[in-house]
Image (cartoon, rainbow, N blue to C red):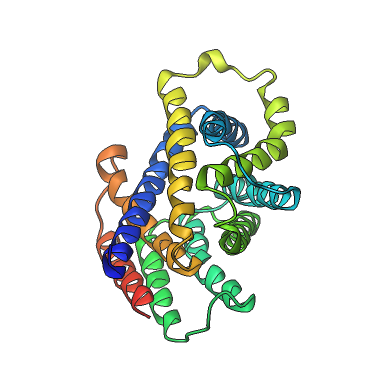
């Protein structure tokens, strides 16, 4: 396979990951009608770990050392647990517009941190594409800025920062283990970190009142956006710079907003069309530079 074909294949995989993570916004919104967000995160990571374990053992032996083990467990605590907790608690306390804008900063944070630690070279022109895509997110969410709070914004920002650290420091370790070995250890760290909250909130929670759709949303979130998508994510991370992967983050608002129209009954708007075009143009420029 030529370099051009290989890159197109990797971009196609990352587009699929982004599409599924965007659909996860819809699934999460439906699930939150009955689930506690912290409890949902705990159960989601636990089920994801249970899905990973048979695949992990089937692939043995795994040549990891204890330093590698603790690094992956620690990264999982950041990327699979802390990120989701901060995001869930933050979105509950701020507006969708503020949350989307802050999440849109993630690729910029990843690029700047990658440059700071020497993983990538700083290219000022690349910031033009990122800035255009971020402006597109602002236009996309322009009409939904009510209900914001400083605390909520700060929590979402912490979630973005934890995912930034997770992505950048996962890059040099991406070849140390296979994708399934990496994801399994990541979720192990997340489950251990979330265990006290998961156990405490499970006591007395009305599980019998949960509708089948709530359980289906949980199973989907554990199997697809968590296990399947992160397996693909690590596969692509081995071949592409971290900043190129996170540039696809800019597509999530337009994808999620578009899917919300038929699935959740949300209306089409001029801001959706204009913001979507700006996001696509920004991603193109960021990738070109």
Q: Nearer the viewer, residue 11 or 256?
A: 11
Q: Quadrant of the C terminus?
A: bottom left
Q: Nearer the viewer, residue 205 or 146?
A: 205
Q: Position of residue 266 (x, y in %)?
A: 30, 45
Q: Residue at x 38, y 75 (%)?
A: 286
Q: Position of residue 226 (x, y in %)?
A: 49, 41
Q: Quadrant of the N terminus?
A: bottom left
List the single residue furthest toward the bottom: 124
List the single residue furthest toward the top: 208
Q: Position of residue 44 (x, y in %)?
A: 55, 33
Left/right placement of residue 66 relative to residue 135 reads right
Q: Nearer the viewer, residue 45 or 238?
A: 238
Q: Position of residue 15 (x, y in %)?
A: 33, 55
Left/right placement of residue 257 relative to residue 103 reads left
Q: How many marks?
A: 0
Q: Residue at x 40, y 72 (%)?
A: 135
Residue 16 versus residue 219 in the image, above or below: below
Residue 256 versus residue 221 in the image, above or below: below
Residue 75 versus residue 121 in the image, above or below: above
Q: Residue at x 45, y 53 (%)?
A: 235
- Quarter residue 30 falls in: top left
Q: Residue at x 50, y 66 (%)?
A: 242
Q: Nearer the viewer, residue 245 or 143?
A: 245
């Amino acid at each position: 396979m030529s370099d051009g074909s290989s890159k197109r294949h990797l971009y196609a995989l990352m587009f699929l990951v982004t599409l599924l993570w965007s659909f996860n916004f819809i699934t999460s919104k439906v699930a939150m009608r009955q689930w506690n967000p912290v409890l949902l995160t705990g159960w989601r990571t636990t089920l994801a770990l249970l899905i990973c374990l048979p695949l992990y053992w089937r692939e043995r032996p795994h040549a990891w050392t204890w330093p590698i083990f603790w690094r992956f467990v620690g990264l999982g605590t950041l990327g699979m647990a802390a990120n989701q907790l901060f995001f869930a608690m933050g979105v509950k306390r701020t507006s969708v517009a503020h949350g989307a804008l802050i999440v849109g900063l993630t690729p910029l944070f990843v690029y700047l941190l990658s440059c700071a630690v020497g993983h990538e070279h700083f290219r000022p022109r690349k910031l033009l594409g990122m800035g255009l895509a971020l402006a597109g997110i602002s236009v996309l969410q322009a009409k939904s800025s009510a209900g914001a709070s400083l605390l909520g914004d700060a929590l979402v920002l912490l979630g973005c920062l934890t995912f930034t650290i997770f992505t950048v420091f996962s890059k040099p370790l991406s070849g140390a283990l296979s994708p399934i070995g990496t994801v399994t250890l990541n979720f192990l760290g997340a489950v251990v970190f979330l265990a006290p909250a998961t156990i405490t909130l499970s006591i007395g929670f009305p599980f019998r009142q949960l509708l089948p759709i709530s359980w289906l949303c949980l199973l989907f979130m554990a199997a697809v956006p968590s296990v399947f998508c992160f397996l693909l994510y690590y596969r692509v991370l081995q071949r592409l710079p971290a900043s190129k992967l996170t540039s696809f983050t800019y597509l999530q608002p337009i994808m999620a907003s578009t899917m919300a129209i038929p699935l959740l009954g949300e209306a089409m708007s001029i801001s959706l069309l204009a913001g979507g075009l700006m996001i696509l143009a920004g991603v193109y420029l960021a990738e070109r530079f």
